Image (tube, grey):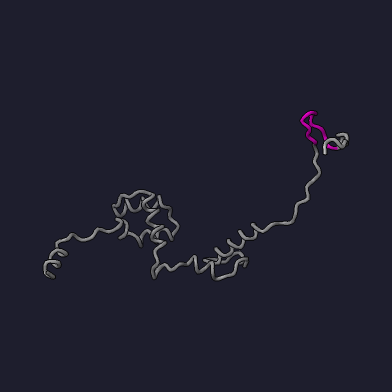
Amino acid sequence: MDHALHAMLESLPPSRRRSKLDPYAPVIRALRTQGRSYREIVAILRERCGVSVGLHTVYHFAQAQARKPGPQRGGRRAASRSARPPGTVTPPGVVGSDRVDAAWARIAAVKQPGPARVTAPKAFVYDETEPLQLAETMPKTDERT
């Protein structure tokens, strides 16, 4: 019976790759690291590698590759966010993951409630039964309160 099972396994065709972009994953990763757009990557793959593929296919492939854990990619974002406590401000000119931390610190600072604003007195008074008038020329009555 082992011989029959082995013969059946030998007769099966080789498994197909999940994506035709798998052989080009290092190229796509390198081009994205250089700051190339997905549109440029599609053109490079078509002209240089002879691979006809859509823009969204390359985008989704690159996103899926970025999510895969591996020795060359190991959750850089998660490590950079947990490395510093929230609210820590990084001086300008710092590169790499520290720049991400600085951006999160600026976002947190913007979200902080600021001091109460003092509103200027209204210049006009609106009453639907009367024409629009300047506030200082409007007669003061107790009826509009």
Relative to residue 142, is residue 42 drawn left or right? left
Residue sitting at x 14%, y 63%: 8
Q: Is residue 63 left or right of residue 136?
A: left
Q: Is residue 106 left or right of residue 74?
A: right
Q: Is residue 129 magenta?
A: yes
Locate residue 52 relative to residue 14 in the image: left or right.
Answer: right
Residue displayed at 80% across by 36% down:
125
| Residue 126 lies in quadrant | top right
Give coordinates of residue 86: x percent, y percent. Answer: 60, 66
Image quadrant in which the N terminus is located: bottom left
Image location of residue 140, percent across then percent down = 88, 36
Instruction: State the residue at coordinates (81%, 32%).
Output: 133
> Is 119 situated above or below 5?
above
Q: Nearer the viewer, residue 42 or 139?
A: 139
Quarter of the image holding residue 139?
top right
Tell me, yes or no, whether the highlighted magenta stretch contains residue 12: no
Q: Is residue 142 above or below residue 3?
A: above
User: Split into 4 quadrants, where in the image is the C terminus?
Assistant: top right
Residue at 37% from the left image edge and 53% from the top image edge: 58
Q: Quadrant of residue 9?
A: bottom left
User: Which residues are the magenta region?
Assistant: 125-135
> What x and y, as percent, mark residue 61?
37, 56
x then y, percent, for residue 134: 82, 35
